[in-house]
Image (cartoon, rainbow, N blue to C red):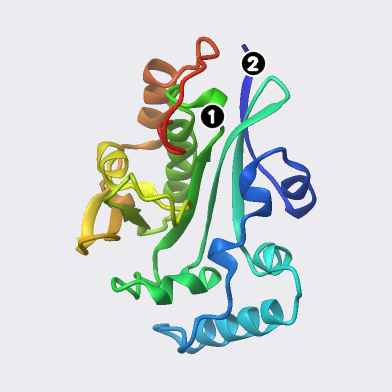
Amino acid sequence: MKTTIRNIGLKEFGDLDIECASCNFWFDHQVQGGFSAKNIFDYLKGKLYQWSSSRKEKGSVDSFFRYGGKVKALFIEDECGGIIIYGKPYLFPKIKSFNVYPPDNDSIFIGCIFVKPDYRNMAVGQRLLLSLEKDMVKKRVMALEIIGQRDTSLKEPRSLVPVKYLIKNGFYIKKNDSCWPLLRMDINSLVPDSRLEKILRRNVVINKRVEAPGRLYNG
């Protein structure tokens, strides 16, 4: 079964048959308060991004891509099995509504890891994370950060990844919270590029389609 991971742009993202293409959770700009930034460049870019996004009636996904937001998708044959959405923290204004705000502005923030129901429990999420880690090693990014969810029985928000899944895949709790802690993965602690390739070939191979119910992120 042929599988590929690739970066996708705005048009392809909108055409994906996947729930995240219509979800506006992370792009809600009705959150009050200023953006925390260590330098004036990030502060101004964040304000410009939020101003641009707030002018659009149907969310701000196009502004997200225009201002540097990224999406990786894993395809099994020609079908999208899952995606990971990431970028600089100012691209996710909803972070300000969590007690663990702010994240490290030198990190890359992961907003969502989503795996379609037909491909859960098939290491789709792990493959996407490994691909992102590999890119960040090359770009010398210091860390990945993400807000996790402790109580997986909660139906909302649907965009958050279970804490246990994140810890299993190399994250640790940076700022604790009873519901939604901030987790971090230090990129400088990762193995070299060649080792990531060996891990991907040896441990993360999709052998067959598995129909398995479960949470969104059991990939």
Tag 2 residue:
2
How many neighbours does mark 1 have within 10 angstroms: few (below 14), some (14-19), or many (20 or more)? Answer: some
Q: Which mark is residue 205?
A: none
Type of amino acid at the residue the image marks with label 2: Lys
Residue 48 higher or lower than 101, as above or below: below
Gap in angstroms between the C-alphas marked 1 and 2:
19 Å
Horizontally, residue 120 falls left or right of residue 196, namely right
Crowdedness near tag 2: few (<14), some (14–19) or many (≥20) residues, C-alpha within 10 Å? few
Q: Nearer the viewer, residue 144 or 101?
A: 101
Residue shown at 33%/45% (left/top)?
153
Residue 176 placement: quadrant? bottom left
Residue at x 40%, y 32% (from the top left corner) = 218
How many tags in the picture? 2
Per the image, label 1 sits on a secondary structure element best described as helix
Q: Nearer the viewer, residue 69 or 201?
A: 69
Mark 1 or 2 closer to N-term?
Answer: 2
- Between marks 1 and 2 in the image, the one whose residue lies nearer the viewer: 1
Contact flag, marks 1 and 2 (Cβ < 8 Å): no
Whether residue 172 sits left or right of residue 111 in the image: it is: left
Q: Residue at x 35, y 70 (%)?
A: 103
Give amino acid for label 1.
Answer: Pro
Asked if residue 128 lies left or right of residue 185, the reply is right
In the rendered view, would you say 26 is above or below 204? Answer: below
Percent across and percent down for residue 190 are: 30, 42
Q: Which residue is mark 1?
A: 117
Residue drawn at the location 65% of the way across and 70% of the way down:
67
Residue 98 lies, in percent from the top left, at 35, 71
The percent position of residue 177, horizontal first and vertical second, equals 22, 64
Where is the C terminus found, in terms of image quarters?
Answer: top left
